[in-house]
Image: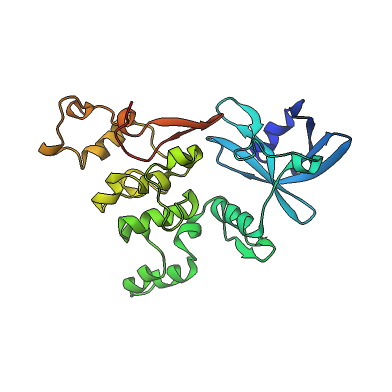
Amino acid sequence: MSPLGEHLLTQSAVRERNYGYRYEKEGATVSATVTGEGERSRMALEWAFGSGVQAYTAVGRAGRRWIEHRISFYAAPARVSLTPGHAGRAILSAEDALGIGQEPSEIARCFGCHATRVRPTPDGVDLAALEPGVQCERCHGPGSEHVEASGGSDPARARKTILNAGRLPASAIVMICGECHRTPKAGQISPAPELEDPLSVRFQPVGLMASRCFQTSGKLSCLTCHDPHGNARKEEAYYTGKCLGCHDGPRAVLRACRRTQRENCLPCHMRRTTPAPHLSFVDHRIRIYSE
């Protein structure tokens, strides 16, 4: 059972509007039953999405429909609350209260970014070969040919049989990371995406691509600051060092700037924000704040 299932089973009185939620263990999964307005609806919560750093969200099926559950577990307050994107949605039945139905293309995208070896189908996804979590082949592509070529005498062929994003231009690296972390739609890069949609700060490439540092440097990418094979680092000094890698020359010195003392750059240029209850993200649109 996933950590999400364990958290949900401890909830004894979850209510949202006129509907109550009850969670029960069924074998290795957890079921959600919604009652209210004289109705009752139920589904098995088959999958848990999220690492748990911010939250966990459940996905299940009611018949042949994939549904993103309306209730998520949030790590910071250690409590359940509405899933992002569900607030303000009209609830007309117990089935509506279970969550939002997902189109085949959208559910394929969800699984494709949270798991490996997922194959889209006209009805949703083929999960027969699924590996939970982001494994090597999710980002680098099928590895069998690479392994075979690596055992031979042609290293050039071995390199061509696997995707190594680190060898690509910065803009291409951001687009590859953005396959899951999201990028703006083609031709729709907003100069201030966080103002048009506060929740866009969840999707770091959206803000980064709107930043002058990204647009003019030609070398800033996700890999400049982050190891794709590990969690984001916590040390402020580490990120300040990355900023000073470009902004430490004579032209960059301003007496009033923390930079002259090599202090933390983030409070002035990449603030942490709370775009929705219980969620906190660093805004990746690098800029000088007006206040």
Q: How is the image coloured?
A: rainbow
Q: Is residue 231 visible?
A: no
Residue 280 place in picture, x, y as percent? 48, 32
Left or right: where 49 falls relative to 46: left
Locate residue 82, reporting x and y percent: 65, 34
Residue name at image x 62 percent, y 63 percent: 120
What is the quadrant of residue 148 in the picture?
A: bottom left
Quadrant the C terminus occupies? top left
Where is 179 relative to 242, above or below?
A: below
Q: Is residue 241 left or right of residue 21?
A: left
- Residue 27 pos. (x, y %): 79, 44
Q: Is residue 219 left or right of residue 89?
A: left
**The residue positioned farthest toward the right in the image shown:** 38
**Residue 250 to residue 120: above or below:** above
Q: How many marks?
A: 0
Q: Is residue 142 above or below residue 278?
A: below
Q: Nearer the viewer, residue 261 or 272?
A: 272
Q: Would you identify the image quadrant in which residue 37 lies?
A: top right
> Where is residue 192 shown, x and y percent of the image?
39, 41
In the rendered image, the quadrant that contains the N terminus is top right
Q: Is residue 148 visible?
A: yes
Name which residue lies at 38% across and 36% down: 233
Residue 169 found in image quarter: bottom left
Residue nearer the viewer, 174 or 101: 101
